[in-house]
Amino acid sequence: MILSVDARPYTDQTLGTSGLRKPVPHIMQPHYVELFMQSVFDVVDVAGATLVLGGDGRFFNDRAIQTILKMAVANRVSHVVVGRGGLLSTPAASALIRARKAKAGIILSASHNPGGPDGDFGIKINAAHGGPIPVSVSDAIHQRSRTCDRYQILAGDDFSLAEEGRRHVEGCLVEVVDSVRDYVGLMETLFDFDRIGDLFRSGFTMRFDAMNAVTGPYATELFHRRLGLPEASLMNQVPKPDFGGLHPDPNPHHAAALVDMVAGRSEVDFGAASDGDGDRNLIVGRGLVVSPSDSLAVIAANARLVPGYRQGLAGVARSMPTSRALDRVAASLGIPAHVTPTGWKYFANLLEAGLITICGEESAGTGSDHVREKDGLWAVMMWLAILAERRLSVADILADHWRTYGRDYYQRLDFEEVDAGAAEELMDSLRRRLPTLAGTRAGAFEVVEAGDFAYTDPVDGSVATKQGVQIISGDARIIYRLSGTGTRGATLRVYLERFEPSAERHHLPTSEALAAVRDTAMAMAEVTRFTGRTTASVVS
Ligand code: G1P
Ligand code: ZN
């Protein structure tokens, strides 16, 4: 029986950089998920369509999946493809949307944010191409949610999602699938598994940290069963609703145990980790952590060594705050390098139009045209494939890369949970001063260019403005922007970068290499005056 339920609309169902994201107690308010999903179903117009549904397994994933399934049936969706156990990594969901020609995908995740009753929950909506919906659609969903005061839902028992299978309910086919098999199959079309297996057989050692999140089952199948990595080389590979109390963000701060083992004590050749929903990655070698911007540049520079990319790259793209290391590789390959606002949706359009093959962000997201999302395990596979071909250490691959292209020292400072009003004022104040900043000096930093990044999408013509303030001084660059994924107060991100052409100066600690740029960045935006902070909450 299908019920129609009346409820009072919520007005705060805005979609940020990657969908709706809220603290768990907030999202568990009466009818909150239901009204949001009804708005999604109304805007996307799902009657008769195929949908893909799954999540990263965090607390409330199981409840939300049942609600959304029952609403999908009530909204006359004809086919729902749902991950076994309610699980789907973000890249696997993207692959499934494309393979099944679904009209949309619904991914339950707050990415790398903590889970559990006091953690965060999120709902991401993906388009038929497999990538995040464009801003026009997320705006329309928010608009609809402001007045949506009734939703349709199937009454009755929960669906069993424990095993693969198909069931018809009220004209809807509910199909439970094991996405691990499909995903590993996709990897097989891109990589030479024997060659990577040879690397492991040669004595090369690795640790992969799934951070108690969704990639555990994928990593177990891929690295252990298919490539022969000993099971003991996998860490935290069983997904847990609260991620075992860990913060599933693959950066040196939150993946400290892995980083200490590989980079600190040099006990293993190669370390990697992925985040809550499996789209981000961390790459670590003996003695060093690879910065995501460098990782992207190395992957692009070496892509032709990998079977799936042997024909070369159509082009590459990075988000504006990502270091310019990628641009140097593109220039040497003679291919276009696009610069987009932060967020994967902009890449999705470029990938879809065939303008780029590989893209990535400083925030540890790297991907290619095999799906329309960033893909953590894919990035790890790219590194493994490159290591298997070149048989050099991670440190030597980087040193060689910097010798060839120069080194872009890079660091991101996050000032978390600052007062939202103060953060806005800081940005407004910077924006007001932009016209007068060019030509000014702050120590060794002479401002050559100062602007607020705007982007016109070459594919759909949409315009995005106010995407971050960029201050450039020849070799150095400072960027300020406010996060669009935080759930508490505001997060100010300050990105620092400096190009160093000379190989003699490629071995400085990053914070030392960027000390002057950091001082300038703190002073220029008066970070302490506006936020009361003298140091960042997280440095990555
Ligand atoms: C953050 C990252 C951004 C990424 C997004 C979703 O967004 O900085 O690169 O696309 O998460 O994973 P932000 O919080 O900066 O808006
Ligand atoms: Zn993520």
Image (cartoon, helix red, strand yellow):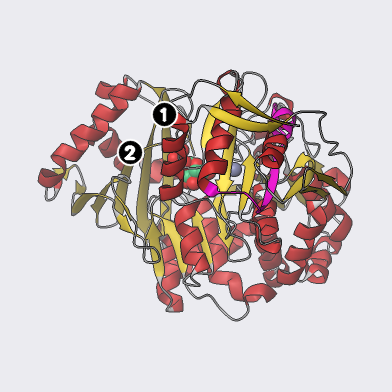
The answer to whether residue 261 of the structure is visible from this angle is no
Q: Which residues are magenta?
A: 44-66
The residue lying toward the viewer, choosing from 521 and 165, is: 165
Mark pair 2, 1: CA separation: 11 Å
- Residue 92 location in percent, x, y? 70, 53
Number of other residues with Cα within 10 Å of mark 1, as a class: few under 14, some 14 to 19, many 20 or more: some
Reading the chain from its start, which is encountered first: label 2 or label 1? 2
- Give the amino acid type for the residue marked by disc 1 in the picture: Ala
| Residue at image coords 52%, 40% | 19
| Residue at image coords 66%, 63% | 382
- Residue 129 location in percent, x, y? 57, 60
Secondary structure found at label 2 = helix
Above or below, comparing residue 382 to residue 81 in the picture: below
- Give the amino acid type for the residue marked by disc 2 in the picture: Arg
Query: In the rendered structure, does residue 297 fall within the stretch colored magenta?
Result: no
The residue lying toward the viewer, choosing from 143 and 467, is: 143
In terms of image quadrants, where is residue 407? bottom left
- Residue 206 location in percent, x, y? 76, 51
The residue lying toward the viewer, choosing from 59 and 294, is: 59
The dot on residue 536 is 1
The dot on residue 518 is 2
Secondary structure found at label 1 = loop
Q: Nearer the viewer, mark 2 or mark 1?
A: 1
Left or right, residue 393 beside residue 206: left
Left or right, residue 267 beside residue 330: right
The answer to whether residue 461 of the structure is visible from this angle is yes
